């Protein structure tokens, strides 16, 4: 298996400099990763550096809390796509999900997918904050709304991806939807365990070490 094409080579730290993004993109080209995942303000830079390569530019929307106005998420996603983003990783409003407002969560995802169109939309459900029952409901909302992936974590909350969560997410969404394991995937063994559990994409800042 081409493990390099499972990896979203990620740098989302608050103190990431332009020079660090250049290094990230150079590594992504060298190792032929699926994408780089950067904060929205670095989408134009990453897009220019990866022009005429098959490494995609992924960015995060409503990150990391997901508590923005839906309109803000829509505008942020639209601008990111206009600036060159190929994939969008959005954070759900976990508070609304926990309160039972699944319709709100699903509608927001649907609106973001309308903006993304043919581009990949991944939905971060922040598994560490949810019960198993809530994880299932979040995954079903994403699936019903037409998202392309569900994703475990931002990496900025109380925990990251676990084998249990990836297995549960894969079981919930079925075989045809993407599942992205993100947060705490640091070794080749971690990657293999996540893939075995059902992950079809890995978000990690340790891509070069893993490969």
Image: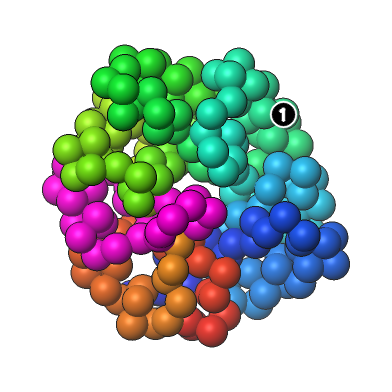
In front of the other: 194 or 116: 194
Q: Is residue 25 above or below residue 189?
A: above
The image position of residue 167, as x and y in percent, is 19, 57
In front of the other: 95 or 201: 95
Count of all numbered marks drawn on residues in the image: 1
User: Is residue 203 rendered to the left or right of residue 195?
Assistant: right
In front of the other: 11 or 198: 11
Location of mark 1 (residue)? 79
Classify mark 1: residues with Cα within 10 Å, few (<14), some (14-19) or many (20+).
some
The image position of residue 47, as x and y in percent, is 74, 50
The image position of residue 137, as x and y in percent, is 23, 31
Span of residues in magenta: 153-181
Residue 51 in sight from this viewpoint: no
Residue found 35% across the figure and 45% down from its top? 129
Residue found 45% across the figure and 62% down from its top? 183
Residue found 24% across the figure and 65% down from its top? 163
How is the rendered protein coloured?
A: rainbow
In front of the other: 57 or 95: 95
User: Is residue 39 rendered to the left or right of residue 140?
Assistant: right
Please identify the quarter of the rendering in which residue 202 is found: bottom left
The image position of residue 58, as x and y in percent, is 59, 49
Residue 152 in sight from this viewpoint: yes
SS at circle 1: helix
User: Is residue 5 rendered to the left or right of residue 163?
Assistant: right
Quadrant in which the N terminus is drawn: bottom left
Please identify the quarter of the rendering in which residue 144 is found: top left
The stretch drawn in magenta includes residue 162: yes
């Amino acid at each position: 298996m081409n493990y390099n094409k499972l990896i979203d080579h990620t740098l989302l730290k608050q103190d990431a400099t332009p020079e660090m993004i250049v290094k990230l993109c150079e590594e992504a080209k060298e190792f032929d990763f699926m994408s780089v995942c950067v904060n929205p303000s670095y989408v134009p830079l990453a897009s220019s550096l990866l022009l005429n390569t098959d490494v995609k530019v992924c960015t995060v929307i409503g990150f990391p809390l997901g508590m923005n106005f839906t309109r803000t998420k829509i505008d942020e996603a639209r601008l990111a796509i206009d600036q060159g983003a190929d994939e969008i990783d959005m954070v759900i409003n976990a508070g609304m999900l926990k309160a039972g407002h699944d319709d709100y969560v699903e509608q927001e995802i649907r609106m973001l997918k309308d903006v993304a169109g043919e581009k990949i939309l991944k939905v971060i459900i922040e598994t560490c904050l949810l019960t198993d029952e809530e994880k299932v409901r979040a995954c079903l909302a994403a699936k019903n709304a037409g998202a392309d992936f569900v994703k475990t974590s931002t990496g900025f909350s109380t925990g990251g991806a676990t084998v249990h969560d990836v297995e549960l997410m894969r079981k919930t969404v079925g075989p045809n939807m993407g599942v992205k394991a993100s947060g705490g995937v640091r070794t080749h063994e971690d990657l293999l365990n996540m893939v075995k559990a059902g992950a079809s994409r890995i978000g990690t800042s340790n891509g070069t070490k893993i490969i």
